[in-house]
């Protein structure tokens, strides 16, 4: 299994090898995320 390095830019944004996740809004029973994906060739390391 491949290990993954996770970089946290601030308390709302996390960067992973495949892109970035930002929490836009969060409540007791919901969370709205903005998910930004890298193009497939960048995520695969080509």
Image: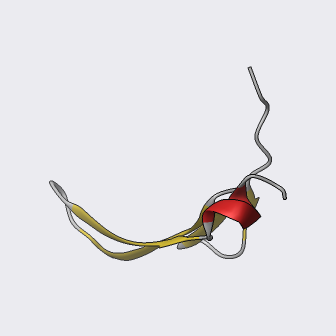
Percent of width and height locating residue 20: 59, 69
Closer to the camera in the image, 3 or 27 = 3
Residue at image location 15% in from the left, 54% down from the top: 29
User: Is the N terminus in the top left, top right, bottom left or bottom right quadrant?
Assistant: top right
Q: Can residue 16 be seen in this view?
A: no
Q: Farthest residue in the right direction?
A: 46
Percent of width and height locating residue 16: 68, 57
- Location of residue 7 (image quadrant): bottom right
User: Is the C terminus in the top left, top right, bottom left or bottom right quadrant?
Assistant: bottom right
Q: Farthest residue in the bottom direction?
A: 24
- Location of residue 30 (image quadrant): bottom left
Q: Farthest residue in the top direction?
A: 1
Residue at image location 62% in from the left, 70% down from the top: 38
Percent of width and height locating residue 33: 36, 69
Percent of width and height locating residue 35: 44, 70
Compared to residue 29, the image places residue 23 above or below, namely below
Residue at image location 76% in from the left, 40% down from the top: 4
Residue 46 shown left or right of residue 13 in the figure: right
Q: Can residue 3 be seen in this view?
A: yes
Closer to the camera in the image, 30 or 3 = 3
- Location of residue 27 (image quadrant): bottom left
Residue 1 shown left or right of residue 27 in the figure: right
Residue 21 shown left or right of residue 7 in the figure: left
Residue at image location 74% in from the left, 66% down from the top: 42
Closer to the camera in the image, 39 or 32 = 39
Q: Farthest residue in the left direction?
A: 29
Q: How many marks?
A: 0
């Amino acid at each position: 299994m491949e290990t993954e390095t996770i970089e946290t830019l601030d308390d709302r944004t996390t960067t992973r090898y495949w892109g970035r996740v930002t929490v836009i809004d969060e409540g007791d029973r919901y969370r709205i995320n903005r998910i930004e994906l890298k193009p497939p060739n960048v995520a695969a390391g080509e």
